[in-house]
Amino acid sequence: MLVVMKPQASEDDIRRVCEKIESMGFRPHPIPGAQRTAIGITGNPGSLPPEEFEALPGVAEAIPVSKPYKLVSREVKAEDSRVRVGPPGRETVVGGPELAIIAGPCAVESREQVFLAAQRVRQAGARLFRGGAFKPRTSPYSFQGLGEEGLKLLAEVRQEFGLAIVSETIDPENCDLVEPYVDVLQIGARNMQNFSLLKRAGRARKPVLLKRGLSATLEEFLMAAEYILSEGNYNVILCERGVRTFTDHTRNTLDLSVIPAVKTLSHLPIIVDPSHGTGKRDKVLPMARAAVAAGADGLMIEVHPDADRAKSDGFQSLYPDQFEALMAEVRAIARVLGRTVGDN
Amino acid sequence: MLVVMKPQASEDDIRRVCEKIESMGFRPHPIPGAQRTAIGITGNPGSLPPEEFEALPGVAEAIPVSKPYKLVSREVKAEDSRVRVGPPGRETVVGGPELAIIAGPCAVESREQVFLAAQRVRQAGARLFRGGAFKPRTSPYSFQGLGEEGLKLLAEVRQEFGLAIVSETIDPENCDLVEPYVDVLQIGARNMQNFSLLKRAGRARKPVLLKRGLSATLEEFLMAAEYILSEGNYNVILCERGVRTFTDHTRNTLDLSVIPAVKTLSHLPIIVDPSHGTGKRDKVLPMARAAVAAGADGLMIEVHPDADRAKSDGFQSLYPDQFEALMAEVRAIARVLGRTVGDN
Amino acid sequence: MLVVMKPQASEDDIRRVCEKIESMGFRPHPIPGAQRTAIGITGNPGSLPPEEFEALPGVAEAIPVSKPYKLVSREVKAEDSRVRVGPPGRETVVGGPELAIIAGPCAVESREQVFLAAQRVRQAGARLFRGGAFKPRTSPYSFQGLGEEGLKLLAEVRQEFGLAIVSETIDPENCDLVEPYVDVLQIGARNMQNFSLLKRAGRARKPVLLKRGLSATLEEFLMAAEYILSEGNYNVILCERGVRTFTDHTRNTLDLSVIPAVKTLSHLPIIVDPSHGTGKRDKVLPMARAAVAAGADGLMIEVHPDADRAKSDGFQSLYPDQFEALMAEVRAIARVLGRTVGDN
Amino acid sequence: MLVVMKPQASEDDIRRVCEKIESMGFRPHPIPGAQRTAIGITGNPGSLPPEEFEALPGVAEAIPVSKPYKLVSREVKAEDSRVRVGPPGRETVVGGPELAIIAGPCAVESREQVFLAAQRVRQAGARLFRGGAFKPRTSPYSFQGLGEEGLKLLAEVRQEFGLAIVSETIDPENCDLVEPYVDVLQIGARNMQNFSLLKRAGRARKPVLLKRGLSATLEEFLMAAEYILSEGNYNVILCERGVRTFTDHTRNTLDLSVIPAVKTLSHLPIIVDPSHGTGKRDKVLPMARAAVAAGADGLMIEVHPDADRAKSDGFQSLYPDQFEALMAEVRAIARVLGRTVGDN
């Protein structure tokens, strides 16, 4: 059920609808739009009688929502969502005209490594820095990240370079540790349906970058985001990073058609990670261009100052020079679509 | 690295090798076999010099292990593992000549429901009872299970019917709650690479039923099991439950060829869940027969006393009568392979 | 549209309905059943008025067919089809209680090879012999088969061993050459949607073995068979041989659940090729057992007297001894399902 | 084996090498490059002694080719191939700086339809016109195309609008009929491994547009092209049109990463068909932009003057207005990559 308020509805009208919903034992989600506010209802086992809400002052109509997802849907919010990232005053907006460029190494390895990487990606125009401190690895014997030490290095990067920090959290308890250090909590592809983690992220006060699972349908992807929104955190950035198919010429198959498909169904911004999406350094640049041309709201790119000696995923990381070249080409493509890319 | 002891090696010899490994900062995993004990080493960043171990008394040889998985591999343990389930004295063995039949409803809904189901599946010869108290659901608005109340009902089922209990755990913290109530901790397909949960399950004192992820390769599946073993819990039962492909005539594609593939590479038992593997009631019986014919060590079957009114997955649950028919056919197939199925 | 005749309808009644259909410019397909005859209509652009047929003598009812396939569907013919293979008097029936076992080398290489193989598979109980004379190969530089010389050797095998011959045809023109030599025309997976070849096979006077395409849905598979039936050849045997998925532990993923799915929708027999379905010799036996347990009407198995030196697909061919062992196990599984396997 | 000539090698030197190859019973394929000519050898069962060729005048070196494909590979020809399409004097070049835009209806339905479509796509800048006269359809009861009548209409279109004609051929015999009418022979996805048709197309005197099969790996795709080249027709244009995966938000999954992958391995041009690649009208524009941004050499777009009433695939066809908008956006993206798109 979605309660759509009239354009002239007052704050009091909205509050009254929310109280009504709560009195029925459900949860109201007021979502302000450019023209009018809509209020999503979650927690109701089935459909509710529209009349009960349409009788309240300021209500335009009450619409039963047919899709399995509610809060992420365009039905609930027609305008594109803009997710504000970083400390007030130094915010970056994801989902606006400027593309969000997130760059940095796969894993945080050392101060020297992250500082070198941060300096170069900052210079090339990135506003967000990525680096894993907790790494979900297929093998228990692979490098699992520096842990909290890595988070501290990331905090230093923010301090030194003014970059917003994106880093992965791997379980609900770990989220308590990671959240204070970062600007965006990343949830990895293998955890896309880790519902305990999604719920915890829904109670976080930081935006969440949600990566698509390796075999997730679009509906499952949106429903995973819905978990986060349904807990009250509306600042979700979707990320396509390739799906698993029969093909073997790239590590995953980057499904760029999901971008226009998301844009049709949802108001959430979506970015693309061509580094994991291809798994091969020489495919990152053309697929970054393609992602932007398809309408992505940003890119997530692995950049390593010494890619050949990276502790993980080095073969798909760009050298800083390659990243600079990528930024130049992406900037030109973005311009065609009426969008911009930050410069140094 | 795998240290293989001589058949006549003493307990002292084995202890001495373990101490040597610990003194190097690594972790020893002594794995007794029918003929001889092998000691796996985990935690070492690269290969170790074999001579250091071959010089110790009782050591036959030290073999560098080429596969990415160690403890789950046949190289480390040539004999099939048998996982003992249930309280001492009333144990069921998974991986021995008798097939492990796990049956019950998708989700615990009420005492009446589980008691009715338990009575019927017990009568038909099942020794293990399944039922979800915590349900990972694609939608945050779907029934998420009865929680601890459900676990208590399952404990009553064990008490009343002597069935060992299999139930799902969904995150590390939840594991603390579930473990005392159940005989087998189940990890669902969507959590197969939830490494925090795998590590926690590796420290549990109950066996773990690990379901294959929807797009997991065999190597990833075995590596997920390796996470559990590497923490010290060697009682892992693998479960094939269908993978995601382009086909649409079943909900998932049951990949029965993974059974002989697992048997070649690993000593762990593997069972099959044709209920989720097909998602359609009328496909469960033929695929259950096929799974046993392919060499599965058991089956996991959804049975609901009132399948059409089930709160989840009713369309793939068998009626008790159908389950009895299934048991009769499976028993006959099992006999051809020199195996047995429990009777009432 | 399907015109169902009354049980007591005469030959004249049936003929009159057919003439009516032809006079409308469409094509009648009378399909005799145990109880009554049904007459399928093809060639009609849309739905026809049932009354026009129901007014004719002997007609029980005229049913608009909802599925995209007509002639292959159970709606048109409720009883399982039995396909008679081989010369009158020495026929083998596919789809009856006895399983059809087709065995032999991937490609015909020499008289010595096929005679040796034929002798052994005949001895083990196979009634049909396979061998490719025209091989569709991924590379233009791979061995493409002996051509007509190979067909002549196959004809000698039939003469000498009384085995019915199954061999592949690769295009419409080639069909003219192959048809006289063989008892069953095989259409390979890569040609499943070669509609020109399907139409030509539909005009052949020999039964057709149609292999499922690598990424064919069940509907596409049945529609490919429909092409053959719609041209007048109702003797079609379906063959599951594995589909292409992300998995890498077998060459293809054998989708055994397609067997019960076909049985629900269609009256056509379906067999399984575990040699191509797994691509690995040691997986053939367990998957052959599983296929029969799932309800397959037969098996197609690659057997080569000198598998390691085979010119194609040797790694998935069984040695004759292994084939004998397979037959013994399959025979025992078949017995459980009330079916038989020929003996020597 | 690949024989690389010295830059200064004479025509006589080249002829002598070819004669040598023929005298050994193999087939020479001289491939002129910007700097030097290379001569591929096909038909040889295994590797040949390099010395035999290196001793001949004008030979720089003889290199054993490691890849399964030879003539399509960059090893054989380093420069991008340019395929000349259309009658001499009015040629269009595919693979050069100008993108090849092929547009038109899925199927030829009437003179009015193709003339209307041709006028509009010509006006918008397309130089090639597509339209199927022989349609491979999943169902035998679907519209199969106008046949030769359709080809005649296409010939009129060429005459009237100066557009080069691209149309599909469905079997070797049909190729005899289609070839004289068209400028480019199209081979559809379902026929990508119809080796008889590939060989026939290899003997055609018109360029061939080869569509990637629904589950074809890159190697299989290139090997299919190799079939055509190995028969002497080097004018092959590859076309990505989406592959089959588990996703359901588009009809197929457009695999744009195959573009840079092809460019690395092969000298052949590759274009993209976003109409079939997405199967949805509103996804065609963004994916067309993305394809060009990824480096495609052209696009194939379904345009129908009355898309809603199209006899096949109307839901994925653009209206002429939408095609004009697409051309404008694609032109701007092309410019960023230093390429052009024809104007009206």
Image: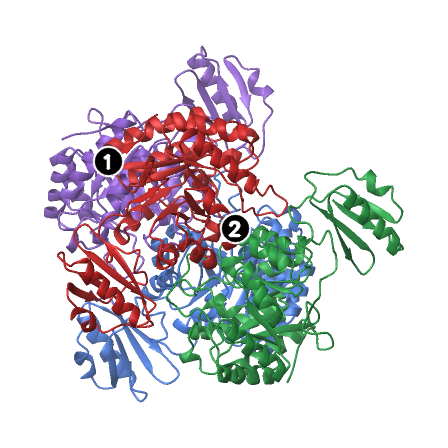
Chain colours: A blue, B purple, C red, D green
Give the residue type that dot 2 points to. Asn
Q: How many dots with numbers?
A: 2
- Crowding around mark 1 (Cα neighbors within 10 Å: few <14, some 14 to 19, many 20+) is some
- Residue found at x 36% / y 28%: C125
| Residue hosting label 1 | C337
Give the residue type that dot 1 points to. Leu
Q: Is residue C319 left or right of residue C47?
A: right
Quarter of the figure with residue D206: bottom right
Viewport quadrant of the C terminus of chain C: top left
- Residue B33 visible in image: yes
Which circle's residue, 2 or 1, is located before the other in the chain?
2
Residue C114 spot, x, y in % from top left? 50, 31
| Residue hosting label 2 | C174
Residue A265 spot, x, y in % from top left? 39, 71
> Residue farthest to the bottom?
A8
Quarter of the figure with residue A72: bottom left
Q: Secondary structure at mark 1?
A: loop
Disc assigned to residue B203: none
B189 w.r.t. A59: above or below: above
- Crowding around mark 2 (Cα neighbors within 10 Å: few <14, some 14 to 19, many 20+) is some
Viewport quadrant of the N terminus of chain C: bottom left
Instruction: Kindly indicate whether the residues beneath marks 2 and 1 are on one polypeptide chain.
Output: yes
- Residue B65 visible in image: no
Q: Secondary structure at mark 2?
A: helix
- Residue found at x 25% / y 59%: B142
